[in-house]
Image (cartoon, rainbow, N blue to C red):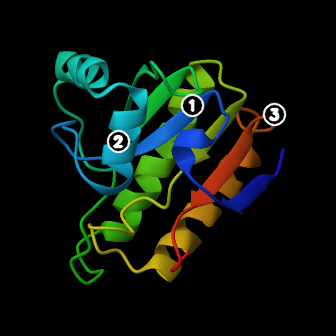
Amino acid sequence: MPLRIVHGDIVRTKADAIVNAANEHLLAGGGVCGAIFRAAGAARLQAACDEIGHCDTGSAVATPAFDLPARYVIHAVGPVWQGGSRGERELLAGCYASSLALAADLGCASIAFPLISAGIYGYPKDEALVVATETIESFLATDAGADMDVILVLYGAGA
């Protein structure tokens, strides 16, 4: 299935999995992370994250979605932008690829992403969009991704 790019609020998006732009300690934060925690039920989502404990940058882990219109929250840790010469592109692509592979392993038919690392982590939005779309399109061209519906949900006026 194709990649769709929409403007909206990811916590209202209907998908089997919703991706959280997480931090390595899987703690509730601001921006999209805070919105996902609030919408899911912050205490229950934090307890599920605490059981996992940690996720490396460029990787992803999954928890139940609790009160969200999804089955799973996939917590993907993107890189903090440091000018582009510290492997940020590869780490960002890794968190999209890890999330997609995890969604496939969980039997998800659909997944919704925010634009990871393009908020408080400072990744330039236009470059983050290129990395996201290239990585997602590569996955969709594989057998594992052939039947998955992927939605990239852009939020805010700058999107």
- Residue 135 shows in the view: no
Q: Are marks 2 and 1 in contact (CB under 8 Å)?
A: no
As drawn, 40 above or below 84: above
Q: Is residue 139 or residue 32 the one in the foreground?
A: 32
Quarter of the figure with residue 112: top right
- Residue 7 shows in the view: yes
Q: Is residue 17 left or right of residue 107?
A: left
Of callouts 3 and 2, the N-terminal one: 2
Picture coordinates of residue 95, whole percent (x, y): 41, 49
Measured in 3D between alpha carbons, the distance from the residue under mark 3 to the one under mark 1, in whole angstroms, is: 15 Å
Please tell me which residue is depicted at 24% across the width and 22% down the height of the picture.
43
Picture coordinates of residue 88, whole percent (x, y): 32, 68
Image quadrant in which the N terminus is located: top right
* Pointer 1 residue: 17
Q: Amino acid at mark 1?
A: Ala
Quarter of the figure with residue 70: top right
Question: Which numbered circle lies on residue 128?
Answer: none
Q: Amino acid at mark 3?
A: Asp
* Pointer 3 residue: 147
* Pointer 2 residue: 59
Measured in 3D between alpha carbons, the distance from the residue under mark 2 to the one under mark 1, in whole angstroms, is: 16 Å
Of callouts 2 and 1, the N-terminal one: 1
Picture coordinates of residue 84, whole percent (x, y): 30, 80
Please tell me which residue is depicted at 75% across the width and 36% down the height of the picture.
148
Please tell me which residue is depicted at 31% across the width and 46% down the height of the picture.
34
Q: Amino acid at mark 2?
A: Ser
Label 3 or label 1, whichever lies nearer to me, is 1
Q: Are marks 3 and 2 in contact (CB under 8 Å)?
A: no
Q: Residues within 10 Å of mark 2 (few under 14, many from 20)?
A: many
Q: Is residue 29 or residue 93 the one in the foreground?
A: 29
